[in-house]
Amino acid sequence: MKLIVEKRSSRASDLSILFVSLFSVLVALIILGLIILSLKKNPIEAYIELVSWPFGTVAGVVQTLIAMMPLLFTSLGLLIAFKMKLWNIGAEGQFYMGAFAATWGALFVFDHISNPWLMVPLLMILGMGSGAGWAAISGLMRAYLGVNEILSTLMLNYIAIHWVDYLVYGPWKGAQSHNFPITATFPKAAILPQYGANGLNLGIFFALITSIFVYYLLKWTRLGYEIEIAGDNIRAAEYSGINVKRTIVIVMAISGAISGLGGMMEMSGVLFRLQPNFSPGYGYTAIIIAWLARLNPFIAIIVSFFFGGLLVGTQQIQLFLQIPFSLINVFQGLVLFALLSGEIFLRYRIKVVRT
Amino acid sequence: MKSKLTLLIILISLIGFMIFAAPLKIGFIFVGPINDNGWTQAHYEGGVVALKKAFGDKVKITYIESVPEGAPSLNVLNSLAARGYKLIYATSFGYMNQVVQASKKYPNVIFEMCSGYELGPNLGEYFGRMYEPRYLSGLIAGAMTKAGKIGYVAAYPTPEVVRGINAFTLGVRAVNPHATVHVVWTFTWFNPPVEKDAALSLINSGCDVLAQHQDSPAAVEAAQNRGIYAIGYDSANMGKFGPDAYLTAPIWDWSAFYVPNVKSVLDGTWKSESYWKGMESGIVKLAPMSDLVPTTVKRLVKAMEKEIVTGKFHVFEGPIYDQNGELRVPAGKVMSDDELLSMQWFVDGVVGRIPKK
């Protein structure tokens, strides 16, 4: 008797994907429980802390939504590019550039506009435009010079982050901020409508609308069709008359525009002023989210909601059970590891063969 | 009837007793891990550990490590306030924006913000005059350098860091008028590999003493490996990472602030203020000098320390010239707190640039 690992011939069904994902999370939770038990603390309490605040209280759910918003925007941006097998890993930089452009608009260009109905759309255009331009650089280099977009998007991230650093440490330092690296606060007109005291803002609804837009784009437009063909086989796309180079640039630009819009929403909806390190790596987490969502814009909503809740919930177990941060890191790693290793069971099957 | 009334009174007083006897719930938000041998560890030991020791059952303390600056900190602030935490310490400048938001939302919670500048009815600020012990460490560096070149690994060009570099350089120049202090920016508070690279580049360019405004002991370690001297920062623990290099370190003792501050909250006498004290309060110190420092230098440092503590000597007293040789502070004049808090120019003797407007 021996075990054989063989590739599955058919694609995994949606149900089995869901089942494997849930099972993976469960495994990670059980391991987390064992670790907590080894600290002589009650794992049940930890599970309750992990879910009760982020999913069970108004303030907590709002916080989860706030944490989810930048993740959703950036993962939506990425999945369009990934659909075409364009490995844009520059969502972080595009997010930064969107935030940069929004700050520029709110504080320096449109600062005399006091009507939010005019200001907010202008900032959205700026944010999208700057994210699009940033990503289009990589798109152009890929299409016409053959430069690997993985490298160029990654490197542009660092440039964007340093660009923002330069501005907040230099010319954009707020007049009232005593030379601290932080810009002035946005004028009222540049701030998105806020609902309730917990910080719920219009940005999250824009994020949801964006996922509908992305779905529509991929499913019902000519561009979506071209993306699908080119993603399957770039040669075939060329033979069928698709201008692949042009499509690469357009897709990268749209991808960057959505991440840039996310940066703008984070500024106008949550932070209201630019400061260094304002993103704890949303654009990188988004890569994982886009993959786990199987590049589906609606599933991306669920996955980023889950990741937002995970972020908020793990803060709770640190705060109220005093679990050290390093273990939280281990747990977040475990969730990912379990989810990714679950993939193996979807792609391969293990067979017992009699010899 | 009477018995019912008595019962009611007992009940009310019991509830009252429970409310008043309930411990004060205190939350700390840390920017790094509590065992970083630097900034966060100093806050942990001077805050969480010292408060538990000083107040025992009268306080209930929780803390959270490595909270990113920006939006994620808002959740921490909100959930602490919503769970009945009445006193919250945010220990990094990057949280200021969120602390201001949370302080408006929870007027009954006291927020204390380290190294920021915004005040509110329930929001105070606290910090220490680290430039005083930095000046003393500069005296030592100036006395120990043979090459006349001292390296300074610096995090970000914030006024606090600039002030520290200036005070250090004034100390160096007081004993060694021709020595120069070479600054490298790392643009990170805590990133050991980056800090180490910066330290090595300074050593390679000929510096034979290193100082730092970083929260990890990487520079001390680099100095140890390359056989030169180093001055640490934050906590005396840094000495462990370079026994043959470590001279001393300007360090924090946050308990000098936290213990009286919590006491004032317990007594009901707390009021919002901008706390900014120096060596006389004990919040900043020079760590014990190692055996590598000659006795004569030790004596000089001790003498200057006394002058500072008694207020006879002020580090930023003129004449002070900037890098371009321009007289910034005339003789006999002392820089005001406002000028110090927004300092954005280097004194003569510093080699390096502040990213300009």
Image (cartoon, rainbow, N blue to C red):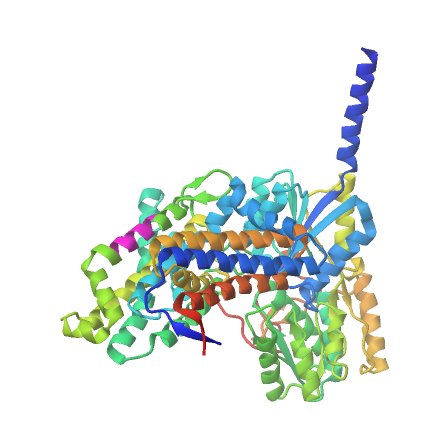
Q: Quadrant of residue B101?
A: top right
Side of A185 relative to A231 (left or right): right
Task: Out of A79 and B272, give the one closest to the viewer.
Answer: A79
For this view, does A331 lie left or right of residue B333? left
Q: Residue at x 26, y 58 (%)?
A: A218
Res A89 → quadrant: bottom left
Residue at x 65%, y 78% (from the top left corner): B219
Q: Position of residue B22 (x, y in %)?
A: 76, 39
In the image, taking residue A342 as reference, residue A80 lies left or right, namely left
Q: Is residue B312 visible?
A: no
* Residue at 58% over, 55% down: A314
**Magenta span includes B276:** no
- Residue at image x 43%, y 48%? A269
Q: Start and end of the magenta stretch?
A: A209-217
Q: Quadrant of the N terminus of chain B?
A: top right
Q: Quadrant of residue B185?
A: bottom right
What is the residue that sits farthest to the top in this orientation?
B1
Q: How many marks?
A: 0
* B307 lies left or right of A212: right
Counting from the top left corner in percent of width and height, residue B203 is at 63, 86
Near-viewer residue (A320 or A74): A320
Q: Residue furthest front?
A: A355
* Picture coordinates of residue A336, whole percent (x, y): 50, 64
- Secondary structure that dominates the magenta span: helix
Residue A128 percent coordinates (x, y): 32, 58
- Residue A325 seen from this side: yes
